[in-house]
Image (cartoon, rainbow, N blue to C red):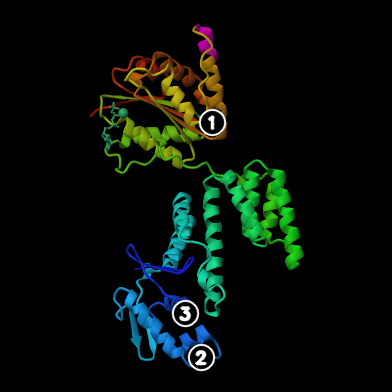
Amino acid sequence: MDYRILGPLEALDGERRLSLGGTRQRAVLALLLLHGNKALARDMIIDELWGESPPQTAHKVLQNCISALRKELPGGAETLGTAGAAYVLRLEPDELDRNRFERGLADGRAALAAGDAAAAAAELREALTLWRGFPLSDFAYEGFAQDEIARLDELHTAGLEDRIEADLALGRHAELVPELEALVARHPVRERLRAQLMLALYRSGRQAEALSSYRDARRTLLDELGIEPGRPLQELERAILAQDAALDTAPAARASAPGRRAATPVVGRDEELALLEAGLEDALAGRGRLFVVAGAAGTGKTRLGDEIASRAKAGGARILWGRGWGGGGAPPFWPWIQALRDAGQTFPEPAGDDDGARFRAFEAVTEMLREEAARQPLLLVFDDLQAADTDSLLLIEFLASELPEMAVLMLALGRDETPGLDELGRLATQTLHLGS
Ligand SMILES: Nc1ncnc2c1ncn2[C@@H]1O[C@H](COP(=O)(O)OP(=O)(O)OP(=O)(O)O)[C@@H](O)[C@H]1O
Ligand SMILES: [Mg+2]
C-alpha cells in the first residue's frame, strides 16, 4: 500500500486509487494512519472527530466508516483489525509517505554531516518531492490534525534549509537567491534562512545586498520579537564586511580528475615510490623536482603516476595532468593544453612560428605556473610522452630548468622509445626505468 498524507489524503494499491468515501470516513483513515500499528480506542476516535458532544449515532457512523474502509483496503479486516474496543491499522514503515519523508530527511542530514553534499542534496531533494502541498490538507481545520500539521510543516522547512545548505556547498548560490528570497518572505524570523540568503548573495558578488539583507533581518527580529539577531547571524555580517575567505565555497571535487586512489594497491614498487615520495616532499617544501619514468607498455608508469597523484593530493597539492595523443589530429602542445586546463588556465599559443614567439610562450607558461604554485603546490604529470609533439617535450625541458625555486613536482612518463626522453633525464633528479 501507498498511503499519502503530505497533501490531500490518498491511498493507492499499486495503480488503483482507493475510494475513501466522505469526510468522516477519510478522517477515520487519517487518524488510524497517524497512529499506525497502535490500538486506537473507539471512544478516542469519537472524541477526536466530534469533540465534547458527539451525536447519539456516533458509534454507528464510526462502525460504518470502518466497514467501508475494510471493503476498500486490501486485506480487509486483517489490515484494519479490531482489538477489543479499539481499532488498529497495520502499516509497514514504508507504506506511509510521511515515514519515507522522515527517513529521507534523516539520510540526507547524515550525508551532509559526513561532508557528502552531492548525496545530501539528492537525498533531500527526493524526500521533499513527496510533499504534494499542505500536509493533511483535507483536515486543516480538524483539531486532531493540528499538532501533526505543525510538526510536519516545521520538518519540511528544516528539510528545505538542509537541502539549501547542501546546494550552497555545491556552489549553487546564484540559482538559490530567488528561492531564498521567497522563503524569507514566508518565514521572516527564521535566522538560518536569513543567513543562507546573505551567504548566497555574498557569493554571487552581491555584497551590498547581503549586508542590507542583514539589516532587514535585524529590523524584523527587533520589530516582531524584540530581540537582536543571534550570534551566528551577527558573525556572518562581520565576516561579510571583512570579506573573510572562509565564506568562499570549497572548489567542488572533480570526479574525473586524475589523482583518485585506484581500487587496488600498487605492488612491488616500493623503491620507486620512496624516491618519488621524497621528491614530492621536496616539491611541497618549495624545492621543485623533475622525475622521468620510462618503461615498456604496461609496466605501470601511469599506475605509479596515479599513486603519487593521490599522495600529492593528500599532501595539499593540485594535480595537473596532460597526456600525449597518438591517434592523430591533436593540436600542438596538446599535453600542456590539458594540464593548464586542470589549473583553470588557457595555454598561451605562440604568436607566430618563429623561435622568438615560442620562447615567449614558454616564458608565459612558466610564469603562470610560478604564480599557481605560489598559491598551491602543484603536481604536474605528463603521460604517454611517446605520443607528444616535440615542442611539448621542449617546454617540459624549459620548465625543468626553472623548477628548483617552485613548489612543483613534475613527472614525465613515456615508453622507452620516447624521443628526447634521455635529454630530459639529464635535467631530472632521477630517471626510473620500470622493468616488467
Ligand atoms: N605496481 C603495480 N601494482 C598493481 N597494479 C599495477 C602495477 N603496475 C601496473 N599495474 C596495472 O597494470 C596495468 C598496466 O599498467 P599501466 O597502465 O600503469 O602501464 P603503463 O606503463 O602506463 O602502460 P602504457 O605505456 O601503455 O601507458 C594497469 O591495469 C595497472 O593498474
Ligand atoms: Mg600509461
Q: Which residue is mark 1?
A: 373
Q: Quadrant of the image for the C terminus?
A: top left
Q: Give 292 or 251, whichever is nearer the viewer.
A: 251
- For marks 3 and 2, the one nearer the N-term is 3
Residue 43: horizontal and vertical position, in percent?
A: 46, 90
Task: Locate residue 74: give its quadrant.
Answer: bottom left
- For marks 1 and 2, the one nearer the N-term is 2
Q: Is mark 1 within 8 Å of ligand 2?
A: no
Q: Give 259 or 78, whichever is nearer the viewer.
A: 78
User: Left of 372 or right of it: where is 189?
Assistant: right
What's drawn in magenta, residue-wise?
A: 354-360
Q: Nearer the viewer, mark 1 or mark 3?
A: 3
Task: State the residue at coordinates (62%, 44%).
Answer: 203
Q: Nearer the viewer, mark 1 or mark 2?
A: 2
Residues under labels 3 and 2: Cα distance?
Answer: 13 Å
Regarding mark 2 in the picture, which secondary structure is present there? loop
> Residue 55 bears which disc, if any?
2
Task: State the residue at coordinates (52%, 76%).
Answer: 145
Q: Is mark 3 within 8 Å of ligand 1?
A: no
